[in-house]
Image: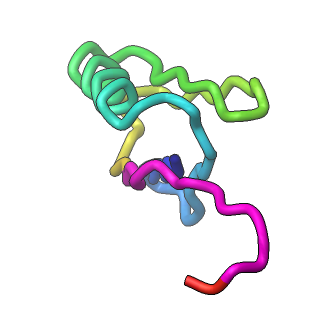
């Protein structure tokens, strides 16, 4: 699933592909923002992404993506 994080006062955004569920990501974001701590997520390649909770401007959580294999038409 795609996760996009907007950081305050930064033009770009942090984009990662995560194997965590949308509920897990939402809970981690809520805890980081409410508690003023760090948002810590792991992407699908095992890399750790850390964003300070107070600097989070927005988080866009995409739907899980089912990967298709082959050349069949839809």
Q: Nearer the viewer, residue 68 or 62?
A: 68
Where residue 50 sits, quadrant-wise, is top right
Task: Find out whether residue 62 is within the magenta segment.
Answer: yes
Is residue 6 left or right of 28 when viewed as pictured?
A: right
- Residue 21 picture location, percent across and down: 41, 31
Please provide the residue range marked out in magenta: 60-72
Q: Nearer the viewer, residue 55 or 21?
A: 21
The secondary structure making up most of the magenta span is loop
**Residue that appears at 70% across and 80% down:** 72
Is residue 67 left or right of 9 when viewed as pictured?
A: right
**Residue that appears at 47% across and 55% down:** 9
- Residue 57 picture location, percent across and down: 35, 49
Task: Find out whether residue 66 is within the magenta segment.
Answer: yes
Image vertical order of residue 44 relative to residue 9, above or below: above
Image vertical order of residue 49 relative to residue 63, above or below: above
- Residue 42 picture location, percent across and down: 63, 25
**Residue that appears at 36% across and 22% down:** 28
Q: Nearer the viewer, residue 45 or 64?
A: 64
Image vertical order of residue 35 relative to residue 25, above or below: above
- The residue most toward the front is 72
Is residue 34 left or right of 42 when viewed as pictured?
A: left
């Amino acid at each position: 699933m795609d996760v996009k994080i907007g950081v305050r006062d930064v033009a770009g955004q942090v984009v990662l592909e995560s194997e965590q569920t949308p509920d897990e990501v939402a809970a981690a974001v809520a805890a980081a923002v409410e508690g003023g701590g760090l948002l810590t997520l792991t992407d699908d390649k095992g890399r750790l992404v850390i964003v300070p909770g107070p600097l989070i401007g927005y988080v866009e959580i995409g739907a899980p993506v089912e990967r298709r294999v082959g050349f069949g038409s839809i």
